[in-house]
Amino acid sequence: MILVTGGAGYVGSHLVMALLEAGKDVIVFDSLELGHIEIIDILKKYGNLKFVQGNLKNLDDIRGVFLVNKIEAVVHFAAYSQVAESVQNPQKYYYNNVYGTLNLLNAMLEFGVNKIVFSSTAATYGEPVYTPIDENHPQNPINPYGNSKLMVERIMDDYDKAYGLKSVRLRYFNVAGADSKSRIGEWHNPETHLIPNVLKATPDKKFKMFGTDYGTKDGTCVRDYINVEDLAVAHIKALEYLQNGGDTNYINLGTNEGNSVKEVFAACEEVKGVSIPLEICSRRAGDPATLVADNKKAKEVLNWIPQKDLTDCIETAYQWEKVLKRSSK
Ligand code: UDP
């Protein structure tokens, strides 16, 4: 059985769908603070899925999962991930993302489970020194969120050296899109991400474009948008890599392509076929001008090549927005 922490959340749920469709037995552990039970109910239709509600901050919650289930490997998504919130409330981030992960790792050691795929982030690199960013780029996070993820990466290195716990840290760039059959998708409250915010905009609640004075091709920030279904495939390949005896590793997940906020906005207008209400605003604190992945290592180590482009991301996100709107969530 594969244990997926945070499997009721955005990225985690897409991995769970892919695992179930590949015939794997899955157990999701999620506090449901940010994840949704409705997503679990949908996922249950697609295979053998067990759900446990619990919090990683309670060691007994996660020990209980290992005590009564035969876990082969863990994929660990459960975390807070809002940069601005992490600056205002670092305690929340370190307590949950670091202490919570320590409880998970310690339970793994106690029950002899030694394989974990971890959701890391491009935020561990901090302000880019060069672009595209490869895995040897210095890691100097500029906010507590990035720090919390880097601390876990370091802990995983030490746990490998001392206890032989093997990890693959997947450093995501900008995850986007939804399930191509619109069964599940991104569902945050409040939503902070670019594509859903552009798609949701109305004349009363215009899309706010944060900063048009960056030193980029059109003055707006450039990001590398990686499709959530492609990302799920990379996690399955990372699990296979560990199950085939692969050593601890760290790998970027991105497309090698950058798109500006203005380009994303225009692509959303194209997909919706209407003009979207827009308000130009000042820069959002903590946004680097450009973040683009060098994704060669993912090809070399995992044989993973992203298949979907920005339009796929926007089209699937748009279909999912309609589902959410219909159910008024
Ligand atoms: N952005 C924006 N308006 C929004 C949300 C995001 O202009 O309502 C911009 C943001 O400033 C950044 C880019 O879109 O330059 C991507 O932001 P997002 O929050 O989606 O991801 P991040 O890069 O912060 O992980």
Image (cartoon, rainbow, N blue to C red):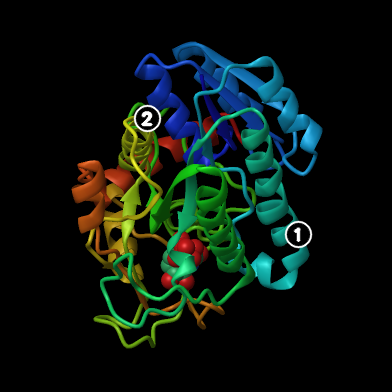
Numbered disc 2: secondary structure: helix
Q: Looking at the picture, how far across and down is residue 125, in whole percent?
A: 44, 71
Q: Looking at the picture, how far across and down is residue 149, in whole percent?
A: 56, 59
Q: Nearer the viewer, residue 301 or 285?
A: 301
How far is disc 1 from disc 2 in space, using C-alphas?
33 Å
Image point (64%, 30%), residue name: 29
Q: Looking at the picture, how far across and down is residue 91, in whole percent?
A: 77, 64
Q: Nearer the viewer, residue 294 or 217?
A: 294
Mark sitting earlier along the chain (1/2): 1
- Note whether residue 195 is visible: yes
Q: Quadrant of the C terminus?
A: top right
Which amino acid type corresponds to the residue marked 1 in the rendered image? Lys
Residue 92 numbered mark, or none? 1
The residue to which callout 2 is attached is: 243
Dot 1: within a 10 Å radius of its alpha carbon, few (fewer than 14), some, or many (20 or more) residues?
A: some
**Figure quadrant of residue 261:** bottom left
Numbered disc 1: secondary structure: helix
Which amino acid type corresponds to the residue marked 2 in the rendered image? Gln
